[in-house]
Amino acid sequence: MIAMKEFLGTLRTRREIGVLGAFVVLCMFFSFATNTFFTVPNMLNILRQVSITGLIVMFMTMIIISTDIDLSVGSTFAAVGMIVAILFQNGMSIWLASLVGLFAGAFLGLVNGVVTVKGMLPPFIVTLGTQMIYRSLALVISGGSPASVRLPDSFYNVTGARTFLNLPVPALWFVATTIVAGFILHKTSYGFKVYATGGNEEASRLSGISTDRIRITNFVLIGVATALASIIQMAYLRGVTPTAGQGMELTVIASTVIGGTSMFGGVGTIAGAFIGTLFMGVVRNGLVLMGTSAYLIELIIGIVLISAVWFSTLSSREKR
Amino acid sequence: MANNTLIQYESVSKRFGGVQALDQVSFPVARGDIHGLIGENGAGKSTLIKITGGIYRKDSGQVIWEGSPLDVNSPVEAEKRGISIVHQEIPLCNNLTVAQNVFLGRLITKPLGQPDWNAMEEQTVDLFQQIGQTINPRARVGALSVALKQLTSIVHALNTTSKLIIMDEPTSALTPSEVETLFEVLRKLKSEGTTIMIVSHILSELMQITDRVTILRNGRHVETLDTQDTNIDSIVHMMVGDVPLPTPKEDVVARDETVLRVRDLGNRRLRLKDINFDLHKQEILGLAGIQGAGRTELATTLFGVHQPDSGTIEMEGKELKCRNPRQAIQHGIGYLTEDRRNLGVFWDMSVWQNAGAAIIDRLTARGGVLDRRRINEMANRSITDLQIKTSGISQTIRYLSGGNQQKVLLARWLNVEPKVLILDEPTRGVDVGAKAEIRRVIQQLVTEGISVIVISSDLEELLALSDRILVMANGSIKGEFLAREATFDKIMALAVQK
């Protein structure tokens, strides 16, 4: 138990405590400012709202820790959704179609990873390019029109529905994914190598770590997570549009960095990513409940993003 | 003497923390001379240059420049007084043209302030002609050879109408014919009255080009004398001083079992050629040489970072072809880097993470899950064996002293349980206590059956540790000594060959 505590201690950064503090203050503020914020239905609502991006945030955190970035998640999201929906409309079992969708997500991620790593290109540029390519893919296979799906209950119940205690199933997927991602990043040698690659890629290579393999795997993992998010969203909305997920990468990256992950790599945690995800969701939800003008919400979120990151890097800045 | 002296150093001293880099250094440099500055690594040459060029401030003493005290606080001020430095790593903008680089920071402008490229390009051609060279002023600097880059850097210096040009290791990256061209340029500059100070490890070249030489040792001035009145042997002796011979190592068991056999190894890009040697079981083999001799390049080639273009490496009789460090580690080779700061330490990670980085896959239970028990065992053993001072295995390595950081990195390689361990400058930048500790560990290792290659610029250390010493210069092995037969003078004489 002591070892466990010590272990968590090494991985937990001070940034994260700052974010947690800010998050608590924020929640208290909205609780006093509105009488609908701090209610069970609204809490569950927030959890459901953030769960789709949250699934992706966990693996974006790993990507950014190893000093990469993935801007193509929104387009992967749409492309996978369209693939699954069209396969289903053409008579394939939704279970099989979803499996194909997960593999498609893995493949799109693999392309990002291999082109970036083996081509020695900046991931920002590669995934900016594939963002456009994958979006086109979604538009081409759908012919530009949305697809609606009438899913069997057996599938809807494990993806889009609400379950006992009125818990939204997407939120359960989000929590489960967080736990899995936390396990991978903090408890396995793979996670260690992600930190090592981001902390000092050259030193990692000299220590016999295949940094190329780690980085490519990260891209595959985020592809799978994005595909899962897309399938769950499709089930919840009972349909998918080829323009789904536009701008999603920005929310995902914002949640990641609010959670204390450093854009310079090597630093970040899944616990932080979880708080960062909730943080983004709470700000949006709280502002809406307060009746803030829709025109102003993005402005305020922008300010919150910059201040949160500024605040959370204060402690590490003093040290250097 | 006074009006013939351009610059006179008077009791110049400089301290960095606990190290006295310069201690009461005094000597003159005559106007119009080519003056060589000689000393081992750490003798104080760079510090002296940097004080002259306004990069460092001296603690005490005076630099008299043309008869009055020189107090410059920045390279720009130094340039205004007529002092230019051509650094070893040439700071040129590779994306700009030759003319743009030559006039960087002092563009010639037309009346409305727009740069007058035609005028600058013409002047660039003129300046190159002054040193007897032709150049295309519109060529991009990035596409030039090292030699031409260096000339561009020199012309940049000329352009500021310098009276003194200081060159730091100008020939280290040049081919013999390029060196000849450079020397012609220097002689041309000298004939026009420019004074040149040149720092170099390659004594044969200094003998050829300089009028006078100054020898520094451990921050102190040893001698300034006319080049024609001395020779390489006596300079080498002045560089290393009268060092007491280290107690010769007794010959331990006959080490005839060969672990590593290297034959005709070469790599053109790394300038390694015709490397032949054997490493015996339980042997400590020292690699001596000056900076740029190719020792680190040889070590990293053995470790799979680079692939040789010719020759073979055999390990216990089997040919070894490592495409990356991972394969080298799997075959039982470890390599402690000389560049702890950039290539060794994971700064934001803990002591155990740094110590276990090369064996992380062995610290797992099933399915790649980290095994706390094995981690604790590994980390605590490392801390005890190497006497690492840390508050615990989870302490962030950033907060350890340099010596303890180095011990953690050494632990990383001991944990690999290698057959061959290559240690590149294992005691550089660590305090005396850690130094002794690290040496003790190295000697301990061979008794456990490991064979060690030590690279060190500290000759005394090399003589004390090694069974056998190879001397490298210019990418090849120039000689071999049994440690008990080697002396500083013998080693340095081979190391300073071109």
Image (spheres, coloured by chain):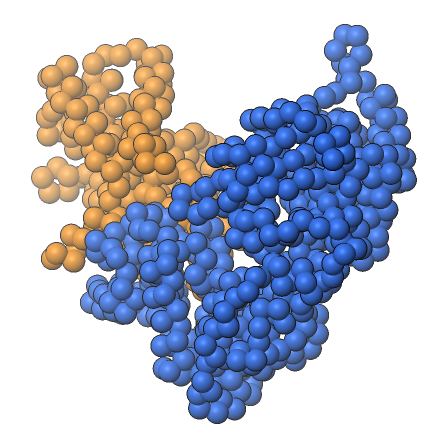
Compared to residue A282, the image places residue B451 above or below, namely below
- Of residues B389 and B372, the one nearer the viewer is B389
Inspect this view and state whether residue B462 appears.
yes
Inspect this view and state whether residue A203 appears.
no
Q: Where in the figure is residue A238, as x and y percent of width and height?
A: 32, 37
- Residue drawn at 40 percent across, 56 percent down: B430
Quadrant the C terminus of chain B occupies = bottom right
Q: Where in the figure is residue B281, as x and y percent of width and height?
A: 47, 85
Q: A44 left or right of B144? A: left
Q: Where in the figure is residue B153, as x and y percent of width and height?
A: 74, 37
- Of residues B111 and B211, the one nearer the viewer is B211
Quadrant the N terminus of chain B occupies = top right
- Of residues B46 and B215, the one nearer the viewer is B215
Task: Tell me the blue chain.
Answer: B
Compared to residue B446, the image places residue A310 above or below, namely above
- Of residues B450 and B216, the one nearer the viewer is B216
Q: Where in the figure is residue A141, as x and y percent of width and height?
A: 52, 41
Compared to residue B34, the image places residue B64 above or below, namely above
User: Which image quadrant is residue B271 in?
Assistant: bottom right
User: Which image quadrant is residue A70 in?
Assistant: top left
Residue positioned most to the front: B1
- Residue drawn at 68 percent across, 72 percent down: B478
- Residue drawn at 23 percent across, 12 percent down: A291
- Residue drawn at 70 percent across, 74 percent down: B274
Count of numbered tags: 0
Q: B445 left or right of B363? A: right
Task: Tell me the orange chain.
Answer: A
